[in-house]
Image (cartoon, grey):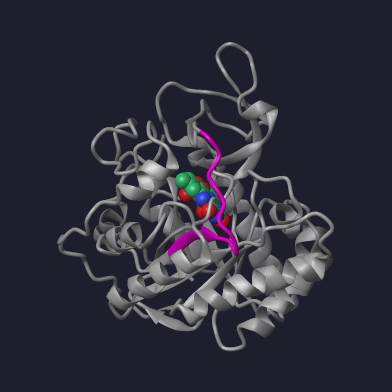
Amino acid sequence: MAWGSFNGDVNSGFAKYDITQDYAWNYEHAPEPVGDVVPVVGGEWLYCGVPVDSPLGIAAGPLLNGKWLLYYASLGFDVLTYKTVRSCERSSYKMPNLQPIAWEGGVVPAELSVASVMNGSWAVSFGMPSKPPSFWRDDVAATRSRLAKGKFLCVSVVATAQDGWSIDDLAADYAQCARWAVESGADGVEANFSCPNVSSVDGQLFLNPTDAGIVAAELREALPNTPLLLKVGNINNRETAHALVEVVAPSADALVMVNGLSAKVRQRNAELLFEGQCRGIAGEIIRETTLEQLALYDGLIREFGIDVRLVGVGGLGQAADVRACLDRGCEAVQFATAAMLNPGLGLAIRREGFSSGR
Ligand SMILES: Cc1cc2nc3c(=O)[nH]c(=O)nc-3n(C[C@H](O)[C@H](O)[C@H](O)COP(=O)(O)O)c2cc1C
């Protein structure tokens, strides 16, 4: 366990998100912003070309709404990704939404076992719930108006596929959400092309470069002047990675990687959790995968002169991880699990520093 700065219990008093409660309860119980002194990060930082105070971000997930976003903004995070929203209301999957898992090192297996205490990794099971568009649009607008300069508010969006939809229908739904986000004042949009919790086409777009290219082009047309990021999952095949990055680079400013890894989870009574479906595995267990994938994409971008930025996410939890991402060509990093376990993570990383060799 390399993260070190939390005591292993997600409900220890460090974490504000209560995993014994459901998504709706946590939505209503956002902490208030804190008044801690935030150490300044030297240097000049950009997020898709927009100046920000640091490259430290929160991934789509922990920021359930504007109140959660403002709380993490007060803790020294400058790139704030609003949890994925849709063009229609959608409820969350039932609990457990966050199930700690056992892991003793090594590659991530296709099946994992539950753990009774949180030791850095968990299965994530929300199914991308969303408030109705009118609700989240007002929340984004109110939140942006309370954010200081140097902070970047990015809204994560996903399409809600209906039976019989073509790829153009799906692209139009993504684009609608993206337009609404920008009309509400979002500084950028992150389109989720990879959700390990859902098996529909919107959750697997990143594995199909042709479809990904169509959706990315439609999003770019909808947002001609706004940063557009695409969130992708784990691709370790060089040919698929190359095909994806070539086809989306003309439309996207950045690729964010990786989303949780897909795996099944077995309970102590030997039955599979989540009705045997895969869920996204997040936390320290996926760190090596993230760093390997970033190195792969960084290599492709440099070898083929591709014009797209990288943002690292997945298993990151300390200053050395920020450095490792910057060394692999990232413009910024995002945290989910580690920042939920220890909301003071950004302050600790700022105090330690993370200058890159690149
Ligand atoms: C509580 C929680 C909720 C998440 N919800 C989303 C989401 O709505 N959209 C998305 O793209 N990723 C979502 N994720 C995935 C994270 O953005 C991130 O890619 C993943 O957790 C790996 O990062 P980590 O190891 O730092 O947690 C969620 C993760 C967590 C822990």
Foreground of the two, 43 or 231:
231
Does 92 appear in magenta? yes
Foreground residue, 91 or 235?
91
Q: Position of residue 217 (x, y in %)?
A: 73, 78
The mark tally for this picture is: 0
- Give the image location of residue 287, x and y in percent: 53, 46
Residue 353: tell me if it is visible: yes
- Stretch of the chain drawn in magenta: 81-94
Left or right of residue 136, residue 36 in this image: left
As for residue 64 lying within the magenta part, the answer is: no
- Image point (53%, 59%), residue name: 84
Q: Is residue 99 above or below residue 67?
A: above
Q: Is 255 located above or below residue 238 in the figure?
A: below
Point out the residue furthest to the top here: 269
Q: Position of residue 257 (x, y in %)?
A: 59, 58
Q: Main secondary structure of the magenta part?
A: loop
The foreground one among 325 and 94 is 94
Q: In which quadrant is the N terminus drawn?
A: top left
User: In the image, residue 193 lies at what x, y percent?
Assistant: 67, 60
Tell me if 166 is positioned left or right of 33 in this view: right
Q: Quadrant of residue 149?
A: bottom left
Residue occupying image coordinates x 33% and y 49%? 28
Q: Is residue 55 visible?
A: no
Residue found 66% across the figure and 35% down from its top: 263
Direction from residue 343 to residue 118 in the image, left or right: right
